[in-house]
Image: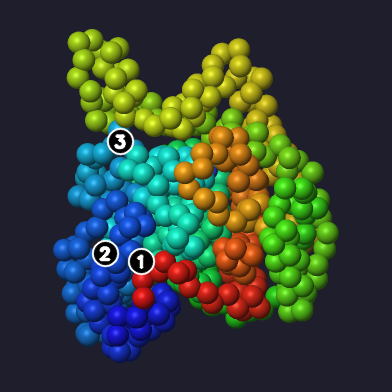
Amino acid sequence: MMSELLDLNLVEASKALKNKEISSLELTKAYLKSISDTSSLGAYLEIVEDKAINMAKESDKKLIDATARPLEGVPIGIKDMFCTKDIKTTASSKILENFIPTYESTVTQNLWNDGAVILGKLSCDEFAMGSSNETAAKGNVINPWLKNKKMSPGGSSGGSAAAVAARSALAATGTDTGGSIRQPAAFCGITGLKPTYGRCSRWGIVAFSSSLDQAGPLTRTVSDAALMLNSMAGYDQKDSTSANLKMPDLMDYLDKGIKGKKIGIPKEYTQDGISEDIVKFYEKSIGWLRDEGAEIIPVSLPHTKYALPAYYIIAPAEASSNLARYDGVRYGARQEASSLDEMYELTRGNGFGDEVKRRIMIGTYVLSSGYYDAYYLKAQKVRRLIKEDFENVYKKVDYILTPSTPTTSFELGKKQDPLTMYLNDIFTVPASLAGLPGISLPVGLDKSGLPIGIQLIANSFDEAGLISTARVLEMSAGFNFIADGAAK
Ligand code: GLN
């Protein structure tokens, strides 16, 4: 029975709950068991068993008296970047190891308002800075694929992706600043959707780079992503960059097809250094979309090569400013000392990990007087050019297809230098800088049996079209492998 329950994806489970074929309590218990069966992956930082059981019971009442809400009774995991009232929220950092928020983030509140059940908080790279989940203060998460090898789940939403792939959460939330939803989704063989900047409220999410941060779902399927995003998205007065634009019901767009749609293939995304198997599946994906009636059009995004350098100035600059609040006074575990300066030094010196310190130093440097114009301002100008590249291309095509990552997952522990790590985001960062919605979905396995992700990028606020197109690709690819390290 347990395995049958775990076999249901979010949309199927939700249907079975509404038809009273299963109860939220039994489903939630199956997931709690699966969390304990897969605990060696290290995906969860905090499990809230009692709360999960209580929420499941509440949901069962609503399911019985037919007042069920869209996500009634489905057990999900939350990335530890989302503040959850009365539940520890650490952003995977030592400096927040004892932080218990007195408020709930808007996105998670939206999910609870729609009936979802919380299982716990999921690990990530510290303050969402990283691409391997290795910067997490409590140690890395293990990818459930190739379980004998200890592969990286990607990052920063590594815990979220690993949990969904390991079937220890029916779905999860993530945040994406430069690829943190799409890259781990690609590494773990699941679907990850980063909405348009402004679609989901940032209120109550631990801030990394405010002009880039965006919440989104990590799920098993495209339909599951649509169902989750329906609940997560929405205008919020408490976030000044929240878009006051109604999103259509994404579930209505699953079967619209792509006949007559134009798909752009950017020539800058097929450079050297990308794995052969990924190229093969990228070409297959182009073929599948063509077979389904799309027109394939070569396009150019000439400023792509400047995206990473611009990102690694803008993101650290904003991070250095956002992280100033962790000073042991306003936020952060204070280290006592004999003077104020020493207290700051000890608190921040002990509380932050190496990668976070590196970003704070880069950020402070590029914002300092004398360097501001040379670096920060220049990077902002490049960002505009990158956005204009996309605007020009969207005059000719509806969607852009790219690989999600240059390689599949890599082995943990083989310390990569920061630059190699930064290169992992080469295909996801441009859409982040332009604020565009993107989705990564699994289309196949490479020679060693690791999942390959392909990315679709849509124009601003066209999540509906992104879902229709992704769904076509998903059906053609027919990816139905389950990780060997997943709960059975
Ligand atoms: N890997 C990228 C970084 O380290 C992106 C992280 C993210 O999207 N949060 O900044």
Residue 352 x %, y %: 36, 30
Residue 399 visible in the current orientation: no
Q: Which mark is residue 458?
A: none
What's the residue type where badge 1 is placed? Ala
Residue 143 x %, y %: 45, 58
Q: Residues within 10 Å of mark 2 (few under 14, many from 20)?
A: some
Position of the C terminus by quadrant: bottom left
Q: Residues within 10 Å of mark 1 (few under 14, many from 20)?
A: many
Nearest to N terminus: mark 2 or mark 1:
2
What's the residue type where badge 3 is placed? Lys
Circle 2 — which element?
Answer: helix
Q: Residue at x 48, y 52 (%)?
A: 152
What residue is disc 1 on? 169
Circle 3 — which element?
Answer: helix
Circle 1 — which element?
Answer: loop
Is 399 above or below relative to 81? below
Tell me the distance, in whole angstroms, between the alpha carbons under discs 3 and 2.
Answer: 24 Å
Whether label 1 lies within 8 Å of ligand 1 gets the answer: no
Q: Nearer the viewer, residue 14 or 361?
A: 361
